[in-house]
Image (cartoon, grey):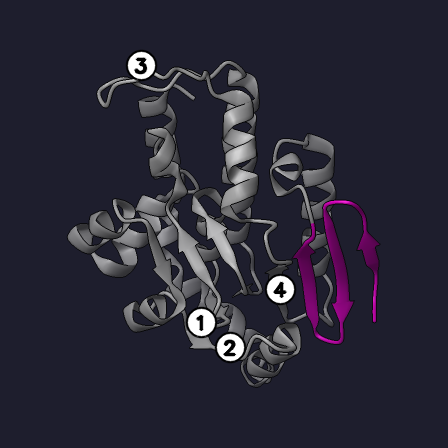
Amino acid sequence: MGKIIDNLYFEASIEENLAIVCFKAEAFELITSINDSQLMMDFIREAEHNHAVKGLLLLNQPGVLGEEVYDVFIRSILKEDDSLEDKDVPTFLQKNTRFRQINILNRFIRFLASYHKMVFVGVSSTVVTPFMGVTLVADMRLASPNGVFSLAHRKYGIHPSGAIPFFLTHYLGHSKALELQLSDRINAEDAFRLGLVNQILPADHFKQNCVRYIQPFLGNYRSTLSMTKRLNNFKNRWLQEYLDHESSLMNL
């Protein structure tokens, strides 16, 4: 086992040919903290330049990316107004925190989109809207039967951040992408049927199951992995244009 980082927010290590990052707690604190998010990205960047590493696996502990923590975060920065009508745009009391959260997360998604090595994500519990984008930018997605994508932003009248419209439209087409974004959630079985998840793996020993599934792909030559990924990710050349459009539309 190689370099290890273990702090309040995440744990990161290199295990043989795979760099592994697991979100542990306070995920929304992590993506609003410039220093801590930079520490995580520095680890991932170092892994990219480590010749022994052929892929990156992102995981999360149960509840860390779920609806409860998202609700606490949004309510802490959103103006509470019982008279809010459907047509009204929500007011953020802490706009800087909201902008910082979106910008750091978008930066992380851009970073993963241009990552030269294979990126895998394991979804073992509920993942809410912003972090769903981190999942969708990955090259392959794995889920346990308990894995759920929650479009929780709808409860607060805010937009689907994390470049979700960009990725879902590419994967599924305009109409299906809109249908999903205006729905409550996508469970693991539906995500698998739609092709948003590559495989559903047993929940017990989920990390080990992910690693076991990933290894045959990493058995390919480095050059094959790199060039195949770069050719298949041609769409990502338009990601920055989409994020600029979001920023302009949302006054970020």
Task: Give amino acid for label 4.
Answer: Leu
Say above or below: 246 vs 207: above
Q: CA distance from mark 1 to mark 3?
A: 52 Å
| Secondary structure under the numbered disc 4 in the rendered image | strand
38 on left or right of 221: right
Q: Mark 3 — residue? A: 83
| Secondary structure under the numbered disc 2 in the rendered image | helix
User: Residue placed at 45% from the left, 55% from the top?
Assistant: 137
Q: Nearer the viewer, mark 4 or mark 2?
A: 4
The label number, if any, that marks residue 208 in the structure image: none
Q: Nearer the viewer, mark 1 or mark 4?
A: 4
Q: Nearer the viewer, mark 1 or mark 3?
A: 3
The label number, if any, that marks residue 228 in the structure image: 1
Residue 133: image x %, image y %? 44, 49
Q: Are marks 2 and 1 in contact (CB under 8 Å)?
A: yes
Residue 50 highlighted magenta (yes or no) = no
